[in-house]
Each structure stands twice: as C-alpha cells, then as structure tokens.
Image: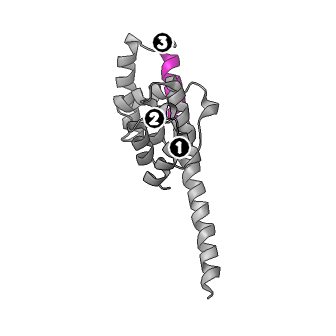
Amino acid sequence: MNASFYNEIKKILISARNKVYQTANFAMVEAYWNIGKSIIEEQGGNEKAEYGTGLLKELSKQMTQDFGKGFTVANLKNMRQFYLTFPNGYALRSELSWTHYRLLMRVENENAREFYMQEAVKSQWSTRQLERQINSFFYERLLSSKNKEQVAEEIQTLEPV
C-alpha cells in the first residue's frame, strides 16, 4: 500500500475525530452556560441571593445522584458565574473549552478578557498557554509597549502552537 494514500486516509479520520471532539466539547460549554442561566433565573435574577446557597447544595446533590461527578457546589457556582461573565450565549466561541472559559472568567477587565478570548482562538492557545499569557499580563504589556510587534513576537517564540 502506498504510504501517502494511507497518510491521506489517516488525516481524514483524525480531522473527523477532532470535529466530533470539538462539537461535543462545545455542547457541554453551552450546557454549562444554560445551567448557569437557569440558576440565575431560579434565584430571581439576583447575582447574590440568600436562597442560592441552599439551591446549589440541593441541585448539586440531585445532579450528582443522577449524573455522577462534576456537579459539586463549586462547579455549579462556576456555571452560574459563567453565565454572569458571558451573558450573551451567542458570543461563546466553539473553539474554546470549558477550561478556557474558567480561566477567562478570572480576568476582571472586560476588554482584557475579550482580547484573551480572541487571541486564544486566533492563535489556538491551549489552556496552559492561555493561563501563562493571563498570568504574565500579556494584554497589559501589549497596551503599555511602544513596540507591540516585538511583544507579540515574544509570545509566539515562548508559546509555539
């Protein structure tokens, strides 16, 4: 069998698997956003609700019973915060994972968060790369730099795709 023929078949299969993974991953991101939205709505739209603590504990208990691990009170709080941080569900990016979004939620400056989100998609940053850029204040360094191209090139050499 011709090696280039096999490599072409292999590329087709790898591409299909990556599409399936990305689709399934984004379906979960959307589900977490919708869970966060539902929690906020159940709490009457309040960002801070007394009723919320008991609600999250009960929801966590029931969801863990029905769906297994992954629905701790802390995770439900993350889902709730996800909706509050990204209230426009249509703006969510399918290229980013739940872990990407959890990192982005920590960025308080909305412009910086939007920058990191767009850059993570454009540069195909892994979650580790995104975390490193956030922790090194890439956005802030880029804004304050007189030589923006040099800062951007520095990132590319430190963080190859």
* Amino acid type indicated by mark 3: Asn
* Amino acid type indicated by mark 2: Arg
Residue 14 rendering spot, x and y as whole percentages: 57, 65
Residue 127 rendering spot, x and y as whole percentages: 44, 46
Q: Observer-nearest residue: 11 or 156?
A: 156
Say which mark, if any, is on residue 120: 1
Q: Secondary structure at mark 3?
A: loop
Residue 96 rendering spot, x and y as whole percentages: 53, 43
Q: Is residue 18 above or below residue 68?
A: below
Q: Secondary structure at mark 2?
A: helix
In this picture, residue 152 sits left or right of residue 135: right
User: Would you call the spot at circle 1 few (<14 residues within 10 Å), some (14-19), or many (20 or more)?
Assistant: some
For the magenta stretch, what is the residue range? 31-44
- Residue 61: name its quadrant: top left
Cα gap from disc 2 to disc 1, whole angstroms: 17 Å
Residue on which disc 2 sits = 141
Q: Is residue 63 above or below residue 48?
A: below
Of marks 2 and 1, which one's residue comes earlier in the chain? 1
Whether residue 95 can be seen here:
no
- Farthest residue in the bottom direction? 1
Q: Observer-nearest residue: 38 or 15?
A: 15
